[in-house]
Structures are given as structure tokens and as C-alpha cells.
Amino acid sequence: MVRIMFGESYAKQLRQIPLADNTVGRRINDISEDILYQLVSRLCTSKFAIQVDEATDIAKDAHLIAYVRYVADNNILEDILFCKPILGKTTSIEIFNIIDSFFEENDIKWNNCVGLCTDGAHSMSGHKAGLQALVKKKAPHAIWTHCMLHRAALVSKNMSEELNSIFTKVIKIINYIKNSPLRARLFAKLCADMEANYTSLLYYCEVRWLSRAKMIQRVFELKEEIATFLEENQHEEAHLWTNDNFIVKLAYLVEIFGKLSGLNKSMQGSQIHPFVQKDKVKAFIKKLKLWKSNLQKNELDMFSLSKDFWATANIEASKNLFIDHLDGLVLHFSNYFKDLDFSKFLWIQNPFNYNEEDEFELTTIENEKLIELSCDSSLKQKF
């Protein structure tokens, strides 16, 4: 209106006047409420599955985060459902009450909930008093699953005492340098003088599963700077950072954690489902067996960092240590992912391979529809 009545110069002046903070806040709240209204409207008429996680923020406050996957217009969509503070104890009953209250407030029916995904904590996964047991009382047909990413994170924690000792020493050195502002500044200056790519180390945060690989990768890239700094400060473990046996084990941890993080990231993202995750895990287990076989033949193509120190390190001791670790990973992956038998759901991936002898746990009417679909040659050509 101002542009039409008075010209562009007046319109520009008006545009430069900022909105009041309460106006911005009110608009954000309006947008948030509208988004929630749209999401709830879809959930009221659709089957859905939820994934919940309890997390603690930097202020030590506990929050319950819930995500939902549902069907809308023949598409599978994913959204964040809510993030609510947990005011009391983080027990299964407290967590369930938060979810149940949200459902009641927004008239969401428990009968439409067909799946629940959580981590493996007892308060979440317990069959008798855990969250899954409380949800099944409201939604008897809901299927509980242990989060695939959490399983992979649990597997990566399993290390031998010797490798765990290496990892612990690395964390100790990081804390020694970073916990003192003076030492952190001096280390940064040393890195700059030595023309390193980085001037600081990364803290390790256990609850951030991918931080392990990033942290130890940074340590390895700055190993020369760390060795020099510890020697100048006459640290008791300075000699380790010039020891090839220590460095070759550190290099192995860098590479194996990098591969585990790569697996974890490949199992994340929009529209990632158990079929994809099952294939990723099966492939990784086969890779572990291949790496073990190659190690036994003294082939290190898959561990290029370790290969550089192989000639000067204690080959047999390191090789046996790595082989044992790979064996342990295969065993733990097999234990944590032993329930990945999706044979009764194969019709989802390829309905044209229907066989009358297969048992898919479908009703007679559903089986009849699947037979019609599997015999439709025009659909088969199209898809």
C-alpha cells in the first residue's frame, strides 16, 4: 500500500522498521500450533508408529522426544511429534503418562498405533513394567522394536581390555590439554606453528555415538603435535606418542570406529526402514569376516593407516589383537541383530514373488488381494 501511494523509497523505509519481539513470538507460536494441528489431523485418520527417546540437555534437564511415521495420501511421512520436559523421575510410567496425556489432549487414538521404537533401556524395553508393556495395554497390536542405531552403538562399545586402555589414555590426554585454558592456548599455538590442519582437539561425549570416531580421528591427525606438547610439558605418557606399537593400535581404532560410524550413518535418514538396515548390517558382518581373513594373510588394504606403521610395530601381537576384536564384533553384531528375519514380510519388497506355500501371517482377504496383485502382468511390467 505504501509503495503504491507514496513510492518505493517510502516502502524501503517502512521495511526497515523491525517487528516487536512479542509480535515475532506470537507468529512463531501461531505457526507451531498450525503445524501441530495439521499433523494431528493426519494422525487421527491414519495408522502410525512412534519412536521415543529420553535425552538430557546441557542444563541437566530431561526431555522426552517423540517422532512419528504415518501414512498420508499413499505416502509414508515422518515428523517430530513433540518434545516435552520430564519433570519427575525418568521412569516408564512417567514417560508413558506424557505420551498418553498428549494423545488425550489431541484426540489421537491408541488403536491406530501399530509400532513403538525405543532404545534398550529397561525402563523402555521391559516386558512387564517397561514402556512397551504399558503401550501394549493401550495398543495390543503395536510391535516394539529395539532401535537399530542404538544396537549398532552398543556393539561399537565392546573392546578388549588392551584396546580399551588405548582409548582411555587418548581421552585422558584430551582432557589434560583441553581442561586447562592455558594448556589449550599453548597447544593451539603449537599446532599453528607446526602448520597443522587443526588447532584444537575434540571432547569425547559418550551419549553422542558418532563423537567417538570424530574425536579419535582428530587425535590421530594431531599425534605429532600431541607428542611434542607432552614432551615439552614432561607428561608421564609422552613416550607413548612416539611408540609405533601404540600408534598402530591407535590407527586401527581410528579406522574401525570410522567404519562403525559409517554404518551408523548409512542406517539413518528419511525413509530408511528395517529392510535397508538389515541389508546394511548383513553386509557389514561379511566385511568384518573379510577383514579378519585379510589380516590373517597380512593384507592391510582395508586399514591403510595401520599399514604405514606395520613394518616397525610388533606385527604378530597387533595382528592377533585386531583379529580378536573383529571376531568380537561379528559375535556382538550377530547377538544384537539376531531377530532380523523378515521372511514373513518379503511380499512387501516384491509382491510378484508370491508363493502359495509362503506364510505371511495375512488374513484370507489380504491373501486374496496379494494373489491378484502378484498375478497382474501389466503391473509387473510397469514396476
Image (cartoon, rainbow, N blue to C red):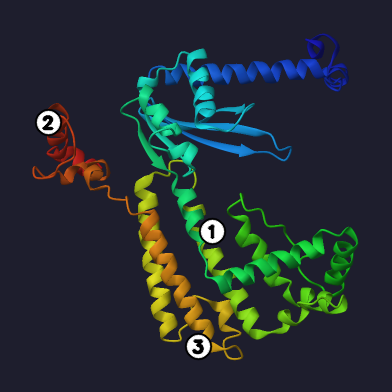
Earlier along the polypeptide chain: callout 2 or callout 1?
Answer: 1
Is label 2 or label 1 in front?
A: 1
- Residue lying farthest bottom? 311
Q: Position of residue 225 (x, y in %)?
A: 79, 74
* Circle on res. 261: 1
Q: What crowding class fits label 1: few (fewer than 14 Cα within 10 Å), some (14-19), or many (20 or more)?
A: many
Of residue 28 and residue 330, the one placed in the foreground of this image is: 330
For disc 3, the marked residue is: 316
In which quadrant of the rendered image does the C terminus lie?
A: top left
Tag 2, which secondary structure? helix
Tag 3, which secondary structure? helix
For disc 2, the marked residue is: 368
Residue type, numbered disc 3:
Glu
Earlier along the polypeptide chain: callout 3 or callout 2?
Answer: 3
Point 30% across, 28% down: residue: 141
Q: Position of residue 247 (x, y in %)?
A: 65, 79
Tag 1, which secondary structure? helix
